[in-house]
Amino acid sequence: MPARLSSATAARRPPGRSAAPPPGRRVLAVPRTWGLRPGDAVYAVAGNALLIVAMWIRHGQLLTSPAADLTAAGSLAALLGTYAALVQVVLMSRSPWLDSTFGIHRIAAWHRWLGFATVILIAGHVLMTTFGYAMADGRSFVAQTQVFLSTYPYMLMAYVGAALFIVIAVTSVRAARRRLSHETWHLIHFYVYLAIVLSFGHQLTTGTDFIDDRVAAGYWIALYVVAAALVVTFRLVIPVRLARRHRLRVLRVVQETPTSTSIYIGGRDLDRLPMRAGQFFKFRFLSRGLWWQVHPFSLSAAPNGQWMRITIKRVGDFTTRLAAIRPGTTVLLEGPYGVFTAVRRHQPRALLIAGGIGVTPLRALIEEMPQRKGSMTLLYRARSWSEVALRDELDQLVAARGGSIHYIIGRRGVEVDRHPFAPRFLNAAVPDARQRDVFVCGPREMVDEVVGSLRALRVPPRQIHVERFALLSA
């Protein structure tokens, strides 16, 4: 059955309770652009990996017997596994250089696969090294393990570190992750730092590549120091500096729909906080039961120098408690993050496609769109009208910019087609999609469906910009 499309204009509806306070004068700081190019980061990572292999060869890792083969392979696996773990830490240090260069989704994907590679290499190191020594000395695997634990320094710590890596990898599998709360999963992943620290002493005191080579030892210490410095800078120093400079507080809380709430946040010198519509921050609310959790939310209004706003959907314990937070509560920030901004535009016209609460960054982006007839079309998908957030604001903003909105409301296969964003429906709603930049935000499944349809319609990849709902709520 065809999708139910409902167009809207501002003249039909007065401003609702979500009407925003009047914005300040828009003389705002914008996010800094960095000179880092994608190739620079790739060359740095690959170059260090080659240097690690070269040092392994230089240290005389000769393949002379099956036992020596296993031991040498285990040594190389340990080096590359440790390096992969450090690269993981750098990727998720929330560096603005990497974020502006690659985007958070690509970084998260690399982090995930590097995590599995780290576990495979570390587990391979344990197995191959133990079997290699056991074969050379005529012992069983268990007996050789006992010798390692009783003879070599820091060995027990290294085994605990390897076990932590395995636990983290297991909980990262999607089937396991769905069974864990966000808070539990996040806490488990903090143990990656402990796993790396526990392995550090073992690496420097028993690794054949470091015992007699101060240059190699110094090189690896430098890698650890750089990774640690990036984490401390971007996850601790900068958030503390932002807190001291802006002193953010909750101004007011507005219920938008039965399941969504807007939180207005104010502070000092917000015009000096570099951010763009479409970006997100990681927020920590210093309130009882909430202070120890940090969650990402997109701005649901464009920066204006006076206040910030996020609009959340109540989907769990955290967001339910957050909807009842009191004005005056202190707020800490990390960010801004994301490249889902108007800076990426290539065409004068835009198509915006939202699913559920994923409309929030699009609502902010609309404020930065030009006021020109026909320059913008918004497709908004929701299961019911009660889930349509910020509707009055959207109608007013889009109409003021000469655009149009199509609401696609209803249950799949009942009120709307099972595939409401199939190529034929997109083509019917927006025949000139190939001549537009397309901004898509919503649940992962919806975004993947939309991107597949856009590709089928031959929309150039550089004109497709996506943000997935999983990043925007908790």
Image: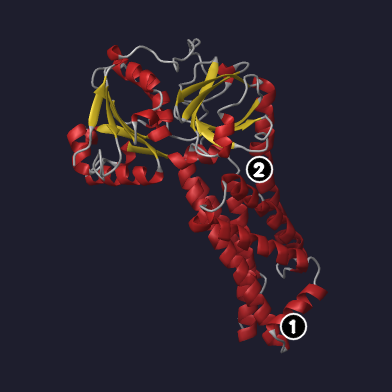
Judge whether 28 appears above or below 80 on screen. above
- Residue at x 34% of width, y 29% of height: 385
> In the visual, does 314 lie left or right of 157?
left
Residue 143, label in figure: 1
Residue 231, label in figure: 2
- Quadrant including the N terminus: top left
Residue at the outermost bottom position: 138
> Which residue is at the front of the view, 272 or 49?
272
Q: Considering the numbered disc 2 on the image, is that residue within a helix, a strand or a loop? A: helix
Q: Are marks 2 and 1 in contact (CB under 8 Å)?
A: no
- Residue at x 31% of width, y 37% of height: 463
> Which residue is at the front of the view, 375 or 207?
375
Judge whether 100 appears above or below 50 on screen. above
Q: Quadrant of residue 243?
A: top right
Judge whether 319 appears above or below 366 on screen. below
Q: Using a 10 Å C-alpha cutoff, classify the residue at mark 2 as few (fewer than 14 neighbours), some (14 to 19) or many (20 or more).
A: some
Res. 227 in view: yes
Viewer-side label of 2, 1: 1
Judge whether 145 appears above or below 41 on screen. below
Residue 101 in the image: x percent, y percent? 48, 40
- Tally of numbered discs: 2
- Residue at x 66% of width, y 76% of height: 129
> Which residue is at the front of the view, 72 or 465?
465
Res. 212 in view: no
Residue 136 in the image: x percent, y percent? 70, 86
Q: Considering the numbered disc 1 on the image, is that residue within a helix, a strand or a loop? A: helix
Residue 70 in the image: x percent, y percent? 62, 79
Amino acid type at circle 1 is Ala
Residue 277, label in figure: none
Residue 181 in the image: x percent, y percent? 57, 47
Gap in angstroms between the C-alphas marked 2 and 1:
39 Å
Amino acid type at circle 2 is Val
